[in-house]
Image (tube, grey):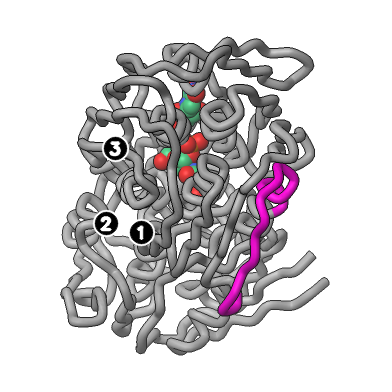
């Protein structure tokens, strides 16, 4: 297993290109199942999760070729070969559950393994099940698999999500495009990845309005056609690299960054004493003074502060002046980076979904372990600020969601390298 070694103290200066959004691409790819015509995605990120989704879709009958080093993904599912998503793939990547809605819409049946829990929480699928049942699907759980059937096809209906689940919104949105009649999705998730998926489906011929608001309306159509769609910029990779100068000083320009993708996050950066300037090419970021200021953070569904940036923010607050309070309201167990940061000298107290961080002058490099995708990158950021050397182990988590993180950071002056065990 690879590790990443970071030697702290180097100031960062330069430009970091931001890739296409992992969490948009993982929802856009299953859309190929909805149509017999080709679907081509551009600006796709080069990540292991994308390769996992490719394997799953190929097992279902999709023909997929990737070009330009993986930035272009050409897919075509003329005929389905299977409607079963096996546990082996789904347990590795929860987003595999996003084939459920498209398979039900196209083939009126699906057998999809429940993903099982992961490091950050139990992550059930009750909201997905309730929403698809409202469209006429019969779904029962047998030996860890959801067995779903839509006799005579799905029918449009009013669907109210008890929580604005991103994945459930994506599953029911894709399913509704081929349902008979109109579907109204209430309390829908509003994330930019939902908006991106709706734009792609519309390019394929779907009739959708209201995406980005809490109510999305879909008029079912008989079939969807071909489309080419550019994957939206990754707002979580963007936010991650915007934080980097707060650890090291200096100034970084994140290419492709847009304020609209991370409004609430930018407000917190400003409160912490970090300047963000919009440029022709993206967002330029630098720290006012020599240390960030403490701020309080509560994670919420978009447009609130993103849970996927909580770990990175906590790492930055470890050396802020003052005490910060963080509340994680989306996942039940998303502070696993805290004990690792404490190994580096951070002062953090965790009580359930609340964490209190008391800023210290300097972190110290240490051997630390990545536990999930966003926790792993928060440890790398902490290593940039720490005295001495930090070794982050189990970086396979990192490769799921960050393209060549050591290349992007060393290009702006970080002393970082990957070593294979
Ligand atoms: C998506 O996961 C993202 N993944 C996650 O990013 C992100 O953290 C999450 O949305 C929240 O923004 C992808 O897009 C591939 P949810 P998803 O359904 O769709 C509970 C990363 O690091 N819930 O909005 O699974 C659930 O347990 C990943 O890139 C139910 O109870 O998130 C969680 O506590 C991590 N029942 C909360 O809702 C359900 O049926 C939010 O889940 C579904 C969800």
Which secondary structure lies at badge 3? strand
Residue linked to disc 1: 235
Q: Position of residue 39 (x, y in %)?
A: 50, 56
188 vs 29: above or below: above
Nearer to the camera, 57 or 152: 152
The residue lying at 58 percent from left, 47 percent from top is 339
Report whether 41 appears left or right of 327.
Answer: right
Dot 2 crowding, Cα within 10 Å, few <14, some 14–19, many 20+: many
Q: Earlier in the sequence, mark 1 or mark 2?
A: 1
Disc on res. 43: none
397, above or below 59, in the image: below
User: Mark 3 highlights which residue?
Assistant: 207
> Mark 3 or mark 1: which is in front?
3
Residue closer to the observer: 378 or 201: 201
Q: Give the range drawn in magenta.
A: 55-69
Instruction: Report which quarter residue 14 is drawn in.
Output: bottom left
Q: Kindly tell me whether residue 90 is visible in this rendering.
A: yes
Question: Which residue occupies 46% across, 29% down?
Answer: 175
Residue that carries the numbered disc 2 in the rendered image:
261
Q: Is mark 1 on a helix, strand or loop?
A: helix
């Amino acid at each position: 297993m690879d590790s990443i070694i970071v030697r702290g103290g180097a100031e960062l200066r330069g430009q970091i290109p931001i890739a296409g959004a992992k969490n948009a691409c993982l929802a856009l790819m299953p859309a190929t199942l909805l149509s017999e015509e080709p679907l081509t995605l551009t600006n796709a990120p080069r990540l292991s999760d994308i390769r996992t989704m490719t394997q799953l879709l190929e097992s279902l009958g999709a023909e997929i070729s990737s070009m330009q080093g993986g930035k272009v993904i050409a897919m075509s599912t003329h005929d389905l070969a299977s409607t079963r998503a096996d546990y082996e793939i789904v347990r590795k990547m929860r987003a595999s559950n996003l084939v459920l809605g498209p398979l039900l819409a196209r083939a009126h049946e699906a057998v999809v393994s429940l993903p099982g829990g992961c490091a950050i929480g139990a992550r059930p699928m009750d909201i997905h099940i309730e929403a698809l049942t409202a469209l006429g699907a019969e779904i029962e759980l047998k030996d860890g698999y959801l067995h779903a059937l839509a006799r005579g096809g799905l029918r449009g209906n009013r669907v109210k999500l008890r929580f604005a689940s991103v994945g459930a919104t994506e599953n029911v949105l894709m399913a509704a495009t081929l349902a008979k009649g109109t579907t109204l999705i209430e309390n829908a998730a509003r994330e930019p990845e939902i908006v991106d998926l709706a734009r792609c489906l519309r390019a394929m011929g779907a009739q959708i309005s209201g995406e980005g608001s809490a109510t999305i309306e879909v008029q079912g159509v008989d079939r969807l056609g071909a489309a080419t769609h550019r994957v939206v910029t990754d707002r979580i990779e963007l936010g991650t690299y915007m934080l980097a100068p707060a650890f090291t000083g200096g100034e970084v320009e994140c290419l492709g960054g847009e304020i609209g993708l991370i409004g609430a996050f930018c407000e917190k950066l400003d409160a912490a004493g970090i300047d963000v300037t919009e440029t022709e090419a993206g967002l330029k970021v630098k720290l006012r003074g020599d240390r960030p200021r403490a701020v309080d953070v509560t994670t919420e569904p978009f447009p609130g502060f993103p849970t996927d940036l909580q770990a990175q923010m906590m790492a930055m607050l470890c050396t802020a002046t003052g005490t910060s309070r963080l509340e994680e309201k989306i996942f039940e167990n998303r502070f696993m980076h805290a004990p690792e940061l404490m190994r580096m000298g951070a002062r953090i107290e965790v009580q359930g979904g609340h964490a209190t961080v008391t800023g210290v002058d300097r972190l110290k490099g240490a051997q630390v372990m990545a536990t999930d995708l966003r926790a792993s990158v928060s440890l790398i950021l902490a290593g940039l600020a720490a005295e001495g050397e930090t070794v982050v182990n189990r970086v396979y988590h990192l490769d799921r969601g960050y393209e060549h993180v050591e290349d992007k950071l060393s290009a702006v002056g970080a002393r970082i390298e990957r070593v294979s065990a």
